[in-house]
Amino acid sequence: AGDSIAGQKVIVKCQGCHGKDGLGRALPGGGEAPNIAGQKYDYLVHSLMAYKARERKSSMMSLVVKNLSDEDIANVAAYYAAIKITVEAPQ
Amino acid sequence: AGDSIAGQKVIVKCQGCHGKDGLGRALPGGGEAPNIAGQKYDYLVHSLMAYKARERKSSMMSLVVKNLSDEDIANVAAYYAAIKITVEAPQ
């Protein structure tokens, strides 16, 4: 399941690009990091594991996940998944 | 850039899983689709192109993008990127 409180210790490695609030920031090399606020827990875990296995390619994310244990991944996913989002859909 | 109004014609292929509001729904095979509401435009285009090139693997997304032109992709990315999201971060 993952522990969102324990995830608060992991996000130091994430927040430079994804924020504490999960909203993507401008990247040093140009472009923006994606939003992950309120993202589904299973999707976040799946994505991080895919970066770790290099099934998904991202030089930045490969570097970051290399030092995350499976428990860290579960906890940080729980942290970002726990952020409540509300949407305002276009008509 | 992509035209979010034109994107409204494309989302018929997306909304079953991602909603008109961009919030992921439960999938028939189990699990949930990710949220894409208010996601960054460039990230959405990059993800869809990666599914089309099969650099990212997803049997569902491969099927869907196969029939999307580059223009469709730009327009549907603009549609979902235009959804305003607000977040409520944990303390």
Image (tube, coloured by chain):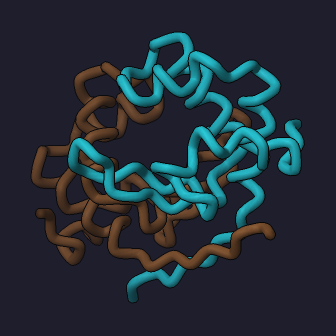
Chain colours: A cyan, B brown
The number of numbered discs placed on residues in the rendered structure image is 0
Seen at 25% across and 50% down, the residue is: A31
Residue B82, located in which quarter of the rendered image?
Answer: bottom left
In the foreground, A75 or A16 = A16
Q: Is residue A7 visible?
A: yes
Seen at 28% across and 46% down, the residue is: A28
Indicate the position of residue A58 as horizontal and vertical percent values.
37, 26
Residue A46, located in which quarter of the rendered image?
Answer: top right
In the foreground, A87 or B11 = A87
Q: In the current view of this chain or complex, which residue is farthest to the bottom?
A: A91
**Position of residue B2 in the picture relative to residue A22 (left or right):** left
Quadrant location of the C terminus of chain A? Answer: bottom left
Q: Is residue B16 visible?
A: no
Residue A42 lies, with reference to residue A53, above or below; the image says: below
Residue A62 lies, with reference to residue B71, above or below; the image says: above
Quadrant location of the N terminus of chain A? Answer: top right
In the foreground, B59 or B84 = B84
**Position of residue B34 in the picture relative to residue B82 (left or right):** right
Indicate the position of residue A43 as horizontal and vertical percent values.
63, 38
**Position of residue A74 in the picture relative to residue A34 (left or right):** right
Indicate the position of residue A13 as horizontal and vertical percent values.
59, 38
**Position of residue A18 in the picture relative to residue A10 (left or right):** left
Residue B1, located in which quarter of the rendered image?
Answer: bottom left
Q: In the current view of this chain or complex, which residue is farthest to the top?
A: A53
Indicate the position of residue B72 as horizontal and vertical percent values.
17, 54
